[in-house]
Amino acid sequence: MRISFTPIGTIHTPYMDTAPYQPVEEDKGDFRIVLDPAYQAGLWKLERFRYIYVIYYIHSLTRGPEIHVRPSWAGGVEVGVFASRSPLRPNPIGLSIVRLKKIEENVIYTSGLDVFDGTPLLDIKPYIRDLDSKGDANYGWIEDLEDRDHLLLHIKGIPHEY
């Protein structure tokens, strides 16, 4: 079976060569999603939500998928790709949750996005508090890391003392 997607827009960020591991809400710069005008009517009432899921194609990979990965922030720990957020996936689809700041026509302004400028947009979905927040979620294998709390600051992109 062959599956294909057509981008519905383009994500614009200040990142050309490097980007944070996860979205940084307080990040400075121009973060916006330009939706193809043909889909603008689909934005109706989206602005009522505080957060959105941004689903995108990770288009700028220079390496292929890997079954085992070593997240750069995890001190050499190896895990399966599906136990990670590595972009080196069989299907390079990314997912970010960002704050929706405003919508002007077909342009969505957001908090910091963790993607390169020009990333193809696949979909947008509203983040709904009681559906999308799981109070009993845990850290999985990350709980076993010696310096877990410090590493979580890196993952989240939170400035801190080293």
Image (tube, rainbow, N blue to C red):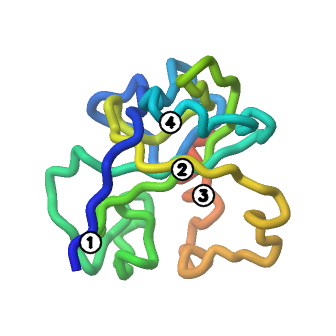
Q: Is residue 70 above or below residue 106?
A: below
Left or right: 32 with respect to 116? Answer: right
Ranked by sequence position, the earlier of labels 1 and 2 is 1
The residue shown at (43%, 27%) is: 13
**Residue 160 quadrant:** top right
Front label number (2 vs 4): 4
Mark 4 residue type: Tyr
The residue shown at (70%, 27%) is: 101
Residue 34 spot, x, y in % from top left: 46, 27
Q: Residues within 10 Å of mark 1 (few under 14, many from 20)?
A: few
**Residue 92 quadrant:** bottom left
Mark 1 residue type: Pro
Left or right: 107 with respect to 74? Answer: right
Disc 1 to disc 2: CB gap under 8 Å: no
How far is mark 4 from mark 1, CA to CA? Answer: 28 Å
Ranked by sequence position, the earlier of labels 1 and 3 is 1
Ranked by sequence position, the earlier of labels 2 and 4 is 4
**What residue is shown with label 2?**
96
Q: Is residue 79 above or below residue 64?
A: below
Residue 121 spot, x, y in % from top left: 41, 42
**What residue is shown with label 1?**
90
Front label number (1 vs 3): 1
Disc 2 to disc 4: CB gap under 8 Å: no
Front label number (3 vs 4): 4
Q: Is residue 11 above or below residue 73?
A: above
Name the quadrant of the C terminus.
top right
**Total label count?**
4
Q: Secondary structure at mark 1?
A: loop
Front label number (4 vs 1): 4
**What residue is shown with label 3?**
152
